[in-house]
Image (tube, rainbow, N blue to C red):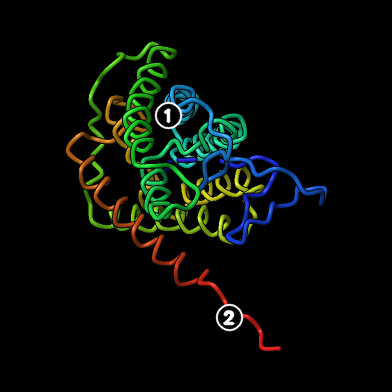
Amino acid sequence: MTVTEATDAAEVTEHGRAGESPTGSVTESQPAPGATPPRRPPLLAKAAAELVGTAALVAIVVGSGIQATELTKDVGLQLLADSTATVFGLGVLITLFGPVSGAHFNPAVTLAEWWTARRGGPGVTLGEAAVYVPAQIAGAIAGSVLADAMFGEPLVKWSTHDRSAGHLLLGEVVATAGLILLIFGLARTDRLRFAPVAVASYIGAAYWFTSSTSFANPAVTIGRAFTDTFAGIAPASVAGFIGMQLVGTVAGLALVALVFMPGREAAE
């Protein structure tokens, strides 16, 4: 599922041009998925944003799943309730925390951004990534525990929901590759101002068109192992899901490089 993360202004392009705001005026570049703020907040603030944002995201996913199962026995309605809450919640969180950390909430997005920025481009440094990822994992676990606490469930109870089937693993590759393609495709085409709506919409759709219901996020996967509720995943299934999410991350970056490769200048 998870990761992160735009504001109203577009990211600076590779040629150094500032993007335009939705109203058409030129504005200062702001953080977004696949990019960190040009004026960097303190690392502590960014780590806190990633921890709190990921915790809130998992609390939304797990909490809405618990609520749905208490209200109806129809699995389709349960999934509809869970996906709807996730769409709205994720959009709000990206908008809120994007100006601080880029609102990744997802180690796959963080590692992909570091990889694309490793030669000096905009994005997280290796040191920042080393802080982001643990913060995201800790936040995911805290969010799961918080959701269980709100609904009177055991605070920590390992999930018994096995998700190890091969078709589910394929679903995670597809879900994660699509997420990475979307985020970094928006970055390449200077349209990151659409990221809160686009990323949330994609995750909502992927709940339904992927067999795995689109975890697409290693931190969220770990967090959801701590709850034996609708959104849970058995600990034995976690490694397989994370492995396929990393495969999906590589596939997504390859698609970005292929689809959004720089064009040639037109001959005069």
The numbered dot on residue 215 is: none
Apparent side of residue 92 relative to residue 219 in the rendered image (left or right): right
The three-letter amino acid code for the residue at tag 2 is Arg
Residue plotted at (27% across, 53% down) = 244
Q: Which residue is mark 2?
A: 264
Label 1: few (<14), some or many (≥20) within 10 Å? many
Image location (x, y in percent) of residue 1: 42, 43
User: Going by the image, does 82 lie left or right of 192?
Assistant: left
Residue occupying the point 47% across, 30% down? 57
Q: Compare residues 217 and 155 and report the one nearer the observer.
A: 217
Residue 242: image quadrant is: top left
Sooner in the amino-acid sequence: mark 2 or mark 1: 1
Which numbered disc covers residue 58? 1
Which residue is the extreme one toward the bottom? 268
Specify whether 52 is left or right of 28: left
Task: Tell me the distance, in whole angstroms, between the alpha carbons under discs 2 and 1.
Answer: 43 Å
Determine whether 157 is above or below 18 in the image.
above
Q: Amino acid at mark 1?
A: Val
The location of residue 105, given as percent across then percent down, is 44, 35
Residue 140 makes an appearance in the image: yes
Viewer-proximal residue, 82 or 194? 194
How many numbered circles are shown? 2
Image coordinates for residue 262, horizontal then vertical, percent: 54, 72
Question: At 77% from the left edge and 49% from the top edge, which residue is drawn?
Answer: 26
Identify whether 67 is placed above or below 166.
Answer: above
The answer to whether residue 63 is visible is: no
Q: Dot 2 lies on which element?
A: loop
Rendered-image quadrant of the C terminus? bottom right
32 or 180: nearer the eye? 32
Q: Residues within 10 Å of mark 2 (few under 14, many from 20)?
A: few
Residue 163 spot, x, y in % from top left: 26, 44
